[in-house]
């Protein structure tokens, strides 16, 4: 009998012990992140997106992918990843829908396309949770991509917005382990929407989920008329340490209270962009200046991105400087918004 144990050494290495009667086998697996690849965003020369995604069945897509690998249009490794992702996405039960959690970034574009390849388009819906501080480029890109994807069931979920949240409700900066803004502006609005649409929840048998019937002030059990949907999310192991241990198989999301599949969990940034360019999809132009599509002044952004925000959209940087002033302490881990604003104003 073999027993396997996993340990982590520091941030970068996973150590696996296979302990059997024959002895011990130790495997050290280095963890690779996007930043190790030193990938630079670079669309192909004269890149021309198509008007729409081609309408094909999953079987047809699989044979096109195999053919493209044979022709050398895509790397074999990427072709294998696409095929594995499609195969791993679970089949739907009768009447079950699939909900894509969409942010307007490259990863959520890739999962939307994979979802479209796998499932009939009538079973799909997409949710975009608006933090009211997306880059203007993101707001203009989204309708273009949705048209390209040819999806009619797309919903924008409203929220109080990041500035109101940080100024009036939770007046402290989010940290990696406590992203209260993601929870309140993205996850809970999605859960409210799913509850309001009367989608069932996936409850734990032994420990009932303490779900928040959040669409009513005082709470009530939700009315269920539809099976719990399968949700699709774009997290990837290689984004960083906090995501490097997310399970590969679909799991129940503790906040959304539904099963979530992550089809690009094992993809790198290079895989994502090569796939999008191979699909000839339009992409969010904000990637020409920043690496990450998120709130424009996300406190986790690098200094360069905050300077870039100030140059491209000074009014948005001014809002962040005011939020920082009201919180009463500079953003964590980078140059403060007020310092950037003052430097840009004086230059
Ligand atoms: S993008 Fe940044 S600021 Fe916006 S919700 Fe996510 S963690 Fe919070």
Image (cartoon, grey):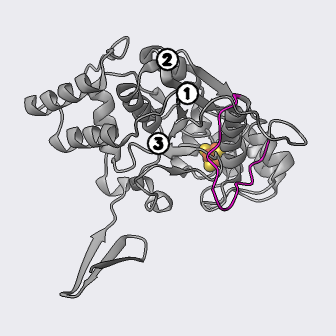
Name above or below for residue 27 compared with residue 268: below
The residues bearing labels 1 and 2 have C-alpha atoms spaced at a distance of 8 Å
Numbered label attached to residue 151 = 2
| Mark 1 close to ligand 1, CB under 8 Å | no
> Does residue 298 appear in this view?
no
Magenta highlight range? 197-213
Which residue bears the numbered disc 1?
Answer: 126
Name above or below for residue 145 compared with residue 271: above
Where, by quadrant of the figure, is residue 17 drawn? bottom left
Q: Is residue 200 left or right of residue 83?
A: right
Q: Quadrant of the N terminus?
A: bottom left
Which residue bears the numbered disc 3?
Answer: 234
Q: Secondary structure at mark 1?
A: strand
Q: Quadrant of the C terminus?
A: top right
Q: Could you say where residue 138 lies in the image, as x and y percent from the top left?
A: 55, 27
Numbered label attached to residue 272 = none
Q: Earlier in the sequence, mark 3 or mark 2?
A: 2
**Closer to us: 310 or 215:** 215
Q: Residue at x 35, y 26 (%)?
A: 117
The residues bearing labels 3 and 2 have C-alpha atoms spaced at a distance of 18 Å
Q: Residue at x 70, y 30 (%)?
A: 198
Q: Are marks 1 and 2 in contact (CB under 8 Å)?
A: yes
Q: Residue at x 45, y 42 (%)?
A: 291
Name above or below for residue 84 compared with residue 244: above
Q: Earlier in the sequence, mark 3 or mark 1?
A: 1
Report crowding for label 2: few under 14, some 14 to 19, many 20 or more residues within 10 A (C-alpha).
some
Q: Could you say where residue 304 lies in the image, as x and y percent from the top left?
A: 51, 47
């Amino acid at each position: 009998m073999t027993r396997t144990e996993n340990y982590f050494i520091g941030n970068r290495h996973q150590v696996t012990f296979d302990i059997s009667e024959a002895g011990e086998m130790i495997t050290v697996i280095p963890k690779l992140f996007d930043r190790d690849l030193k990938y630079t965003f670079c669309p192909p020369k004269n890149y021309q997106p198509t008007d729409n995604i081609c309408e094909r069945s999953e079987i047809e897509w699989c044979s096109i992918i195999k053919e493209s690998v044979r022709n050398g249009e895509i790397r074999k490794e990427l072709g294998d990843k696409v095929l594995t992702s499609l195969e791993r996405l679970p089949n739907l039960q009768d009447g079950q829908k699939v909900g894509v959690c969409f942010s307007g970034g490259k990863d959520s574009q890739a999962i939307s396309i994979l979802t479209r390849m796998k499932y009939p388009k009538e079973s799909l819906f997409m949710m975009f949770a608006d933090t009211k501080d997306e880059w203007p480029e993101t707001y203009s890109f989204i309708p273009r991509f949705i048209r390209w994807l040819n999806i009619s069931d797309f919903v924008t979920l409203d929220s109080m917005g990041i500035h109101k949240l940080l100024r009036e409700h939770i007046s402290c900066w989010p940290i990696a382990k406590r992203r209260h803004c993601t929870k309140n502006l993205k996850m809970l609005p999605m859960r409210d929407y799913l509850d309001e649409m009367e989608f069932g929840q996936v409850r734990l048998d032994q420990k009932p989920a303490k779900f928040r019937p959040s669409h009513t002030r005082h709470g009530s059990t939700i009315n269920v008329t539809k099976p719990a949907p399968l949700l699709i999310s774009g997290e990837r192991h290689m984004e960083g340490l906090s995501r490097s241990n997310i399970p590969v198989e679909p799991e129940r999301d503790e906040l959304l209270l539904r099963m979530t599949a992550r089809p690009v969990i094992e993809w790198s940034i290079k895989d994502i962009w090569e796939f999008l360019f191979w699909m000839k999809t339009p992409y969010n132009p904000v990637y020409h200046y920043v690496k990450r599509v998120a709130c424009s002044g996300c406190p986790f952004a690098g200094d360069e991105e905050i300077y870039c925000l100030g140059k491209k959209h000074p009014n948005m940087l001014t809002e962040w400087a005011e939020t920082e002033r009201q919180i009463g302490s500079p953003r964590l881990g980078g140059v403060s918004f007020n310092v950037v604003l003052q430097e840009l104003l004086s230059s």
